[in-house]
Every structure is written in structure tokens, then in C-alpha cells.
Image: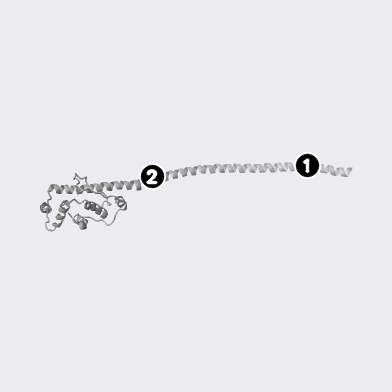
Amino acid sequence: MFQKSDMFKKIKSIFVIDESPEASAEMSDAQDSSSTQVTSGTTATPAAPSPTISGESGKPDQKFTDLLLKAIESNNFDGFDYLEYKNSLKSIEAVIPDEGMRFKSAFEMAKTMGLSKDKLIQSAEGYLNILVSEDKKFKDALENQKAKQIQGRSDQLASIEKSILDKQKMIENLNKEIEASKNQLSSVRNEINDAVVRIDVTNQQFVASYNLVYNQIYQDIQKIKTNL
């Protein structure tokens, strides 16, 4: 078993890592809560196939690779297991170029540490199950992010669209009310103009009648004064 002080560095060194300098912020948010604890006594079961990714964005990311390897680190099984065996493979890579011979040589050394083929496979499958668990946690976190950032915004979008339609209907109703008010305004103006004309005519008629009667009486007074 690796020493705690340099465990992660050693685990990282025995895996071929294609590091990418850029990171996906959305994926990082989803992964913040992802942390799997698997006890050393976990029984290995056939692991699920690794998730397939297509497209230019489907490249290994340094942060995610480190996270997965740290999950393996935190669940490193006791004793000499697959990780130590893989470390042995790495250490003799330059000495034994043939892969088949490397696997056999490293296993011969591992057997002296009490590691059998079954235990080797069982421990390797145990680490696969750790990765499968991390994959599930990541997918769950990702779905949660989708629900928050996509579905939540979709609901907001629908609400805004409804608000726009409601306001458009309100504007249409207001325009109809404005048009009706304009027609009413025109009608009232016409009524006022008609009333002004009628009042003016009535006034003129009254003045004419007033003058007619007034002048007759006035003239009679003058005639009385003159003739009597």
C-alpha cells in the first residue's frame, strides 16, 4: 500500500493522463458535491462500461481526472493490490519493453507479496466500481444542474412569454379603449359645437324679439310724451 504522504502523486504517475488546460465551469459546479467513499471490504462486482463521449469537447479534463484518481486514493484497499501491481508495471516499463513479459514479471513479484490473480482482478474491479459510483454521482449532480439552470430558466422563459402575451393583450384592449374614447371625444366635441350654435341662435332670436317688443314700447312712450 502506498504511503499516505505521496499516495496521490504515485497513483497519478501510474496512469497515462492526457491533461487539458481548459475546464468546463458547468461540469465543475456539478462535480463540487461529488465524493464517493467505498469501504475496503466492498465486494467487487462487474463494473459498468465507461461512459462514451463524442465531439471536440469530449476531452479529458485535469480537474475531473484528479477527482477520479483522488476517489481511488481515498478508497485504496489495504495490502498489495492492483494499484501496487500497476506501479510495478510502470517501474519496469523501460527495462522490459514487451507488455506480456511485463505483466508476467510484475505478477511474479506481486505473488511474493501475497497477491493472487483472483485478488488482483477483484481489487481492479473494485476500483472500477469506485469509478462507476463517481460516474453515477456526477450524472446525478449534472441532472441537478440541468434542472436548476435549464429547466428553471425554461420555466422563467415560459413565464416571461406569458407576461408578454398578457401585456400585448392589455395593450390591444387599451388601444381599443383609446379608440373608443377618441370616438366619444369627437362625438362630444360635435355635440358641444352644436350646442354652441343652438345657444347662439337662441340668443340672437331672443335679442331680436326683445328689441322688437322693447322698441315698440319705447316708441309708444315717446309718442305719449309728445302727443299728450
Disc 2, SS: helix
Residue at 38% from the left image edge and 44% from the top image edge:
155
Task: Using the image as rendered, state which of residue 68 and residue 101 is in the foreground.
Answer: 68
Q: In which quadrant will I find the N terminus? A: bottom left
Name the side, left or right, on which 77 lies relative to 214.
Answer: left
Q: Which residue is drawn at 51% across and 43% down?
A: 174
Q: Residue at position x 14%, y 55% from top?
A: 88
Percent x, y for residue 198?
68, 41
The mark nearer the N terminus, 1 or 2, is 2
On the question of residue 52 being in view, the answer is no
* Amino acid at pointer 2: Asp
Q: Quadrant of residue 158?
A: top left
Q: Which of 164 and 32 is in front in this view?
A: 32
Identify residue for label 2.
155
Query: Residue 32 — which label?
Result: none
Q: What element carries label 1?
A: helix
Residue that badge 1 annotates: 212
- The kind of residue on which mark 1 rests is Leu
Measure how far apart labels 1 and 2 are at the Cα level.
Answer: 84 Å
Q: How crowded is mark 1: few (under 14 residues within 10 Å), some or many (20 or more)?
A: few
Give the percent coordinates (x, y) of residue 210: 76, 42
Foreground residue among 172 and 98: 98
Question: Circle 2: is it few (<14), some (14-19), or many (20+) Cα within 10 Å?
Answer: few
For discs 1 and 2, the disc positioned in front in the rendered view: 2
Residue 153 coordinates in the image, percent (x, y): 37, 47
